[in-house]
Image: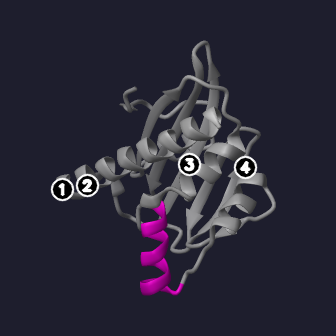
């Protein structure tokens, strides 16, 4: 199963940032051969070992703690704040989070397919006033995109394991 870099879906919560001049946006998609609900995907994403490391770094260096139970509450819609993020918008099968600085967005979505469930992950970087976030350095962009793919791959494995069990 591959992880593809794709255009931001025009009907998604992330699309508003994709249309905003100067914003950097990206979207990645992969698929699992199972029916996975949205809450399962969100909880899986934020509780993978890789994302737990990010949460640990946020706890140590930014005093922004979080727990797996809080990730589950975010996934089920019972919580609107998680570590460094606040819910900006929520749909039936997607979630858009803004970080505490207001400069970045994280987006998750699921869609049913003929073969199972498509898992989406994307980001937006909002420019400073008068700035242009699309001009991020090549190295930063490559690191971000690589990390995004790794996060999605880790979440896909977790969703696949939960769908089997």
Q: Find numbered disc 4 in the image and state the secondary structure of the residue it sits on.
A: strand
Residue behind mark 3: 107
Q: Is residue 19 shown to the viewer in this render? A: no
> Which of the two discs, 1 and 4, labels the residue nearer the N terminus?
4
> Which of the two discs, 3 and 4, labels the residue nearer the N terminus?
4
CA distance separating discs 3 and 1: 22 Å
Q: Do labels 2 and 3 touch, CB within 8 Å?
A: no
Q: Which residues are magenta?
A: 51-63
Q: Is residue 144 magenta?
A: no
Q: Do labels 1 and 2 touch, CB within 8 Å?
A: yes
Q: Is residue 59 magenta?
A: yes
Report x, y in % for residue 145: 32, 47
Q: Find numbered disc 3 in the image and state the secondary structure of the residue it sits on.
A: strand
- Residue 90 is labelled as 4
Report x, y in % for residue 90: 72, 49
Closer to us: mark 1 or mark 2?
A: 2
Left or right for 39, reference 48: right
How would you rate the neighbour count of disc 1 (Cα within 10 Å): few for under 14, some for 14-19, many for 20 or more?
few
> Which of the two discs, 3 and 1, labels the residue nearer the N terminus?
3
CA distance separating discs 3 and 4: 10 Å
Q: Find numbered disc 2 in the image and state the secondary structure of the residue it sits on.
A: helix
15 or 117: which is nearer to us?
117
């Amino acid at each position: 199963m591959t992880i593809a870099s794709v255009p931001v879906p025009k009907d998604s919560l992330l699309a508003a940032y994709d249309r905003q001049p100067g914003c950097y946006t990206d979207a990645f998609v992969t698929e699992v051969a199972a029916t996975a609900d949205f809450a399962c995907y969100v909880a899986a994403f934020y509780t993978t070992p890789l994302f737990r490391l990010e949460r640990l770094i946020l706890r140590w260096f930014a005093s922004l703690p979080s727990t797996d139970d809080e990730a589950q509450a975010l996934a089920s819609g019972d919580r609107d704040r998680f570590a460094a993020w606040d819910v900006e918008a929520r749909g039936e099968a997607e979630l858009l989070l803004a970080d505490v600085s207001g400069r970045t967005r994280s987006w998750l979505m699921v869609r049913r397919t003929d073969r199972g469930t498509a898992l989406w992950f994307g980001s937006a970087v909002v420019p400073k006033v008068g700035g242009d976030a699309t001009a991020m350095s090549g190295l930063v962009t490559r690191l971000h995109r690589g990390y995004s793919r790794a996060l999605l791959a880790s979440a896909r494995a977790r969703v696949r394991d939960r769908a089997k069990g």
